[in-house]
Every structure is written in C-alpha cells, then in structure tokens.
Amino acid sequence: MLCMGSLACILFTIICLYKIMALIVLRKKAISSVTATIVYYRTRSNANRAGLIYYPVFYYNIEGKEYIDQYDMGFPYPYWMINSQVILKYTPNNPLLYYIEDYNYLRTYMLLSCGFFLGFVFSLLSLYCCNIYIL
C-alpha cells in the first residue's frame, strides 16, 4: 500500500515538473500580443472547499479571425470585471496557446515548485520505507 503511495507521489512530481516546463516554454514561444476582452466566467464547484472556481472566457480577434476561449487556470473569485481588457501573449502558429501578459505567475510557479519538491521528498521517503533503494 505504501508503494502505491510512492507511485502517486512520483506521478504528482512528474505532473508538476511538466506544468512548470510547459509554462516556461510557452512564455518563450508566445511572441505576438493581442488585446482580449473578458466576456464572462465559467464556473465549476470546488471539490476541496465550498464555493466556486471562476474560469475567465476571453474574446479576441487576430487577422480577422475571432476566438472565444476559456482560460485553463481558474480563480477563487472573478479576477477581472466582465468587459475588461487584458493583453494576451500568444504563439503565432497557434493563437489558442497564450498567457496573460500582466498577470503575476510567481504564485503559480511557487505552488508547482512546492508540489514538485513535496512529491519528490515523499516519493523518496515512501520508497525508503518500502525497502526499495535507488542508490
């Protein structure tokens, strides 16, 4: 049973590392910018706490083509007002891959890094408890 926990921790560590790397790569590749409007929020119930998670839906126009897209990251409250505008940095070959230019991603990096570190430490501890030695 403990070894299953270590596998879950390893999987969690890999997911956190993947998310960190994907965000870093996106920030390097997204070189074009466009002004987007928050048209509404999609909401989902928060499984861990009472309340809702708010996902902004952006509307933007690039070279005559209109895009309406829900942002991947949700917030515990409506972060922007409806009809407010933000600047999106997007990849020229795929305008649906973007990030919000003025949003501070430090908290996201910190949470993913903590998740990576904790997953790594718990993986090592549980593997040690299962008498599986790596070195």
Image: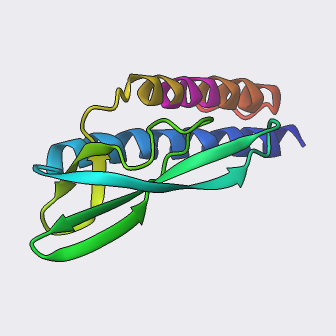
Q: Is residue 66 left or right of residue 110?
A: left
Residue 108, x across and y down, in percent: 46, 30
Boundaries of the magenta span: 112-119
Residue 118, x across and y down, in percent: 62, 24
Residue in front for this viewpoint, 85 or 135: 85
Q: Provide the major secondary structure of the magenta segment.
A: helix
Residue 8 part of the magenta segment: no
Q: Residue furthest front?
A: 83
- The residue sitting at 51% across, 39% down in the picture is 16
In the image, residue 128 sits, relative to residue 22, either above or below, namely above
Q: Is residue 9 left or right of residue 131?
A: left
Residue in front for this viewpoint, 103 or 28: 103
Residue 33, x across and y down, in percent: 13, 50
* Numbered marks: total: 0
- The residue sitting at 67% across, 32% down in the picture is 123
Work out whether residue 62 can be spotted.
Answer: yes
Q: Is residue 121 left or right of residue 37?
A: right
Residue 122 in which image quadrant: top right
Residue 50 in which image quadrant: top right
Residue 63 in which image quadrant: bottom left
In the image, residue 128 sits, relative to residue 9, either above or below, namely above
| Quadrant housing the N terminus | top right
